[in-house]
Structures are given as structure tokens and as C-alpha cells.
Image: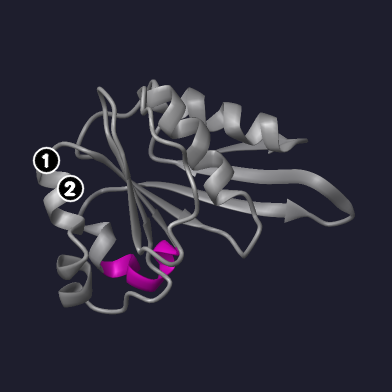
Amino acid sequence: MAEYITHSRAETVELGRRLAAKVSGGQVIAFTGGLGAGKTAFCEGLAAGLGCTDPVSSPTFAIVNYYRGPRPLAHFDLYRISTEEDLNAAGFYDYLDQGAVVAAEWSENLADLLAAENPIRICIAPVAGEENTRRITIEGVSL
């Protein structure tokens, strides 16, 4: 496990871009972190690094946002997903089978199911007293 400290949104985005060079299609990236922690900012960099052409936004209301590109990204919000049936209905496994990189925010809601996919695990947490600083731990890949 490696730990990174970012001091701005731009640095968090850049760390996501760096991760993109290390992932292949069909990879699950399991995010944990509270509201406003920077999960979507990280995914913005990930999408850019994968060559995706669509604008990145939080999948909160849509459940999944799909970003097209040479290495596509399916960006899930699992906050309201609680069963494997719900995960299937949202197309989670279909995106994996199609070779997309799958980023899953609120992954702790389905940690047991996601463990079977051998995910890269990323935890993003604000640093107390430092508004734009984030502590980001990444497990499962070296940057």
C-alpha cells in the first residue's frame, strides 16, 4: 500500500491520470471516502489518462456514467446499491466483460462482492485543518 498527499484538486486529478497508465481493461477500482473527499476528481484524471472524451461528473443520480475512449471507463456510485442483483441490473459485470475500467465509488457498500474482482483499492480522506489537502492510499498497484 502506498500513501500520497495532494494539496489541490489539480494534484488529485493528476494522481488519477498517473493511475490510468497502470490499469488495463476489466479492472475494478474500488473507492472509499466521504462526501466531497475527491473521488470524482480522481476519476476525472483517471478518465483523462485512459483517453476518454466525455466530461466526467459524479454518478450519484445516474448510478453509472460511461466515458467513451480508447480505454473506456464506467464510473459507478454504489451508495444506493446493496445487492448483487442491483449490481447486475446496473450493468456492472457487463462493463467489465466489455473490457471497461470500472471505478466504483462507495465500494464499502459491496466490499465482499467486489473482493472477488481483485480491485485496486483507493481511500481518499481530507486532512484536518487543510481545506484542499487529501491523504490518498492506493493498494493493489504501484505508481
- Span shown in magenta: 106-112
Residue 142, visible in the rendered structure: no
Task: Report the residue at 68% width, 30% height from top.
Answer: 10
Q: Position of residue 33 (x, y in %)?
A: 57, 60
- Residue count near mark 1 (Cα–Cα under 10 Å), binned few <14, some 14–19, many ≥20: few
In space, the residues marked 1 and 2 are separated at their CA atoms by 5 Å
Task: Report the residue at 21% width, 75% height from top.
Answer: 86
Q: Position of residue 115 (x, y in %)?
A: 27, 58
Q: Secondary structure at mark 2?
A: helix
Residue 15 lies, with reference to residue 58, above or below; the image says above
Task: Report the residue at 32% width, 74% height from top.
Answer: 81
Kind of residue at disc 2:
Tyr
Q: Position of residue 84 (x, y in %)?
A: 19, 73
Task: Report the residue at 38% width, 39% height from top.
Answer: 140
Do the residues bearing badges 1 and 2 touch, measured as CB atoms within 8 Å?
Answer: yes
In the image, 77 versus 116, the foreground residue is 77
Q: Which residue is mark 1?
A: 98
> Viewed as shown, does residue 110 lie left or right of 3?
left
Residue 70 placement: quadrant: top left
In the image, 108 versus 69, the foreground residue is 69
> Viewed as shown, does residue 66 lie left or right of 96?
right
In the image, 91 versus 6, the foreground residue is 91
Kind of residue at disc 1:
Gln
